[in-house]
Every structure is written in structure tokens, then in C-alpha cells.
Amino acid sequence: MGVSGSGKTTVGRKVARRLGWEFVDADDFHSAEAVQKMSSGSPLDESDREPWLARLAAEIRTRAASGTGTVFACSALREHYRRTLAGRNPGEVVFVFLHAGREVLERRLAARRGHFFRPELLASQLAALEEPKDTVRVDASGSPADVAEGVVRALGRGRKRAEIA
């Protein structure tokens, strides 16, 4: 979890490969209307996020119930979003907070091509971010390989359920 540019997708894919798990990008669960809204430079509001979070929570529950190890890349910026995603069995989901300084995030977003998230939306995500206190925290300012290694090391307890990076 983390704001745009923190490396959720890139690092999440690397972590999933290292663990032999599946990878799911929460961006794929956005409605066409939400993608269009962000593409036009407007941040999502709660009414945009609620159905998206519900779809993600259902997917997490399904995968956790089947025992499928999965890394989900999701912003999960607010505490109540994380509670929604974790559902009734919060022990089944481990959140990994990828954090980096604003300059790093801005540089990455400026270099990114072909993504619907507009760099000018970073400020709205940073304003919305409620940094988690009870989760794995990994410095995301390094290379994707180094950050993925940090995540795997931090998780080194052999988790078997859905991980959100």
C-alpha cells in the first residue's frame, strides 16, 4: 500500500515472483468512470471508492478462503479502507506500507508513461494518506529490486495469505 509512485505494482510483482504467489493490481478493479475521472486530473471521492473497495475486499476474501497466496497492489490510503479490505478476518491480510519522500514520488510519476494517474493528483493522495501504525513499513526510495528484497525480509515469517504491497 502507499501513494502513487511508491512502487506498489513494480515491487508487488517482484515480491509475488519471489514468494511464488499471484499478483493482483487494484487499479484493474476501478470502474471505467473512475479511470476517466483520474485521467482528466480529478481525484476520486468516497462515492467513487466505495464500490471499488467492495470489489477488492470480495477478491481478497475469495483468495484468502482458497489459500491462494496473493500480493495485492493497492493504495489503501485511509484506515477505514484498510479495515474494509481486511474484512472480518484482519489476521488474514498483512499491509505493507511503501513510503518514499515527495521528491522521489514526483520524479517517478514524471517519468511514468501510459498510466491513467496524473502526477498532479499526488498532492491529493498525500493529503488523504493516513499512515498506518500497525503494519510492515518499508522504505520505497531505493531500486525496485532493493525494495522488494526489503519487503520479503520484513515479511520473513512465512505468511500464507493475502499480502497487500
Image: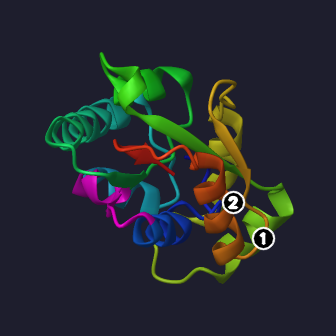
Give the foreground label among 2 and 1. Answer: 2
Q: Residue at x 32, y 53 (%)?
A: 70
Position of 23 with respect to 113 (left or right) is left
Range shown magenta: 19-32
Establish if 64 lies above or below 30. above
Q: Residue at x 69, y 25 (%)?
A: 133
> Which percent across, then down, holds residue 35?
35, 58
Establish if 62 lies above or below 83. below
Report whether residue 2 is seen: no
Establish if 39 lies above or below 85. below
Q: Residue at x 48, y 36 (%)?
A: 94
Q: Amino acid at mark 2?
A: Gly
Q: Residue at x 36, y 57 (%)?
A: 27
Q: Earlier in the sequence, mark 2 or mark 1?
A: 1
What residue would you read off at disc 1?
142
Mark 1 element type: loop
Report whether residue 60 is seen: yes
Q: Which mark is residue 150?
A: 2
